[in-house]
């Protein structure tokens, strides 16, 4: 009998776990998972980890920034062995994830469906049907689209995967059936995203319908003027990070969040002193390369003291460095700040 994992499964060595543990959120217990925020004397924001991978010149990517969701088409799921959809299936009866994906695609592709059914029939005649049986049955049994969508939404309730949250004040990212994040939902390997947009924005109806069909949604928040102007001189409107974290904790019952910025997101968090107290942990992977000028750089705004002299913008304390292959992982906490709730 062999174990089957999806091909993108990551295997995190158990020997490396103790190093990270002090920087991770408290483990959920039976008691705190059933509790609903807000509770008296309890934080009204999630445990917040800021994480990114950078070069020696503090670059996140070579290309100029155009927003992570649009630039990268990211999956934003957890692919470590054991996560939902990455449990591994033992034995001959397990449905290969590639075949499951094909079966999903076959629902809207009659030619592929026909091909799979013929392959199925041929394998049945040779007594090799087991791995095909499950997905083909799924196609035939769940013709009712409403039922199928309901099953996809229900399946997420128990799925051991993080909820992707996309910060997109102008609703520029329009979800598509082909977006990686949505494909992972259909494959049972990720949850549908919550997209945080400005109250003044109206996302296209088809995007809203698609998100809701899969169990995601738009969350509208107030914005404030940032100090960033675009090429037309228009001021960008941003969210207050207190509002983002507060709404996720109190309305969505999210207890832990990992912020996987882009440059604009990370710099917005690190530039404002009032936001630094919201970050519980920082985990940075540093690669031994210089990406050169012109990419997306992590560099918070310059800070000055009361006499106008430049001082460091921010600093980590409680620091640990851990080599991972040629990279090094740096964990720490932002220095000198009370954790605010
Ligand atoms: N190496 C790594 O670890 C990672 C690298 N990346 C890379 O980063 C690049 C993208 O970075 P970048 O273009 O800077 O975009 P980001 O992904 O950081 O930002 C996307 C959006 O966030 C908005 N935003 C930022 N802060 C706030 C806030 N406080 N409130 C509301 N909206 C906010 C910006 O709005 P506005 O434009 O209006 O200011 C922008 O539309 C990509 O190339 C990607 O590959 C991304 C993630 C991790
Ligand atoms: N936070 C963080 N740490 C790293 O080490 C990374 N390489 C990245 N990369 C970015 O995170 C996004 C993940 O997308 P997938 O879920 O892997 O599709 C993507 O935008 C990468 O740029 N982030």
Image (cartoon, rainbow, N blue to C red):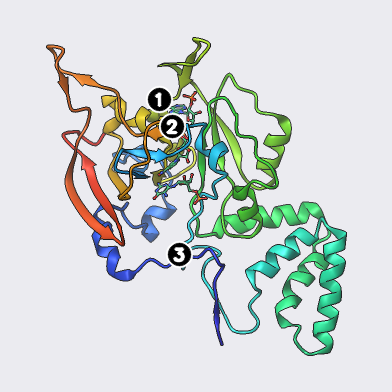
Q: Which residue is mark 1?
A: 240
Q: Helix, strand or loop at disc 3?
A: loop
Q: Which mark is residue 10?
A: 3
Which residue: 42% across, 68% down?
A: 11
Q: Is the distance from the Cβ of mark 3 to the nearest ligand 2 atom less than 8 Å?
A: no
Q: Is the distance from the Cβ of mark 2 to the nearest ligand 1 atom less than 8 Å?
A: yes
Question: Which mark's residue is nearer the viewer, 3 or 2?
Answer: 3
| Residue 99 percent location from the top left of the image | 70, 69
| Residue 224 percent location from the top left of the image | 44, 17
Residue 116 vertical position relative to residue 3 in the rendered view, above or below: above
Q: Quadrant of the C terminus?
A: top left
Q: Seen in the image, is 90 located left or right of residue 12? A: right
Q: Helix, strand or loop at disc 2?
A: helix
| Residue 289 percent location from the top left of the image | 33, 47
Which residue: 68% across, 47% down?
A: 178
Residue 2 vertical position relative to residue 255 in the rendered view, above or below: below
Query: Of all residues shown, which one is farthest toward the left?
Result: 307
Q: Quadrant of the N terminus?
A: bottom right
Q: Which residue is mark 2?
A: 244
Q: Are marks 1 and 2 in contact (CB under 8 Å)?
A: yes
Kindly report the distance in space between the C-alpha atoms of the residues bearing marks 1 and 3.
34 Å
- Which mark sits nearer the N-terminus, 3 or 2? 3
Q: Which quarter of the picture shows residue 38?
A: top left
């Amino acid at each position: 009998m062999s174990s089957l994992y999806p091909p993108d499964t990551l295997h995190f060595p158990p020997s490396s776990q103790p190093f990270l543990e002090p920087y991770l959120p408290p483990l959920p217990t039976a008691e705190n998972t059933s509790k609903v925020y807000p509770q008296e004397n309890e934080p009204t924001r999630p445990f917040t980890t800021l994480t990114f991978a950078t070069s020696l010149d503090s670059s996140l990517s070579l290309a100029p920034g155009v927003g992570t969701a649009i630039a990268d088409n990211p999956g934003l799921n957890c692919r470590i062995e054991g996560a939902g959809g990455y449990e591994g299936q033992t034995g001959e009866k397990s449905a290969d994830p590639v075949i499951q994906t094909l079966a999903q695609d076959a629902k809207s592709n009659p030619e592929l469906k026909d091909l799979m059914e013929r392959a199925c029939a041929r394998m049945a005649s040779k007594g090799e049907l087991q791995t095909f049986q499950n997905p083909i049955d799924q196609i035939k049994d769940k013709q009712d689209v409403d039922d199928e969508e309901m099953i996809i939404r229900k399946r997420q309730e128990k799925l051991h995967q993080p909820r992707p949250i996309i910060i997109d004040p102008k609703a520029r990212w329009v979800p598509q059936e082909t977006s990686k994040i949505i494909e992972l939902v259909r494959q049972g390997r990720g949850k549908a995203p919550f997209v945080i947009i400005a109250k003044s924005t109206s996302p296209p109806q088809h995007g809203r319908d698609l998100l809701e069909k899969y169990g995601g949604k738009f969350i509208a928040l107030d914005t404030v003027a940032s100090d960033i102007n675009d090429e037309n001189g228009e001021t960008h409107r941003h969210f207050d990070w207190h509002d983002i974290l507060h709404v996720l904790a109190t309305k969505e019952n999210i207890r832990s969040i990992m912020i996987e910025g882009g440059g604009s997101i990370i710099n917005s968090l690190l530039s404002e002193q009032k936001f630094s107290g919201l970050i519980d942990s920082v985990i940075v992977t540093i690669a031994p390369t210089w990406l050169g000028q012109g990419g997306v750089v992590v560099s918070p705004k310059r800070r000055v003291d009361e006499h106008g002299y430049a001082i460091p913008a921010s600093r980590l304390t409680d620091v640990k460095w851990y080599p991972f292959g040629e990279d090094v992982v740096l964990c720490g906490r932002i220095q000198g700040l009370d954790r605010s709730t």
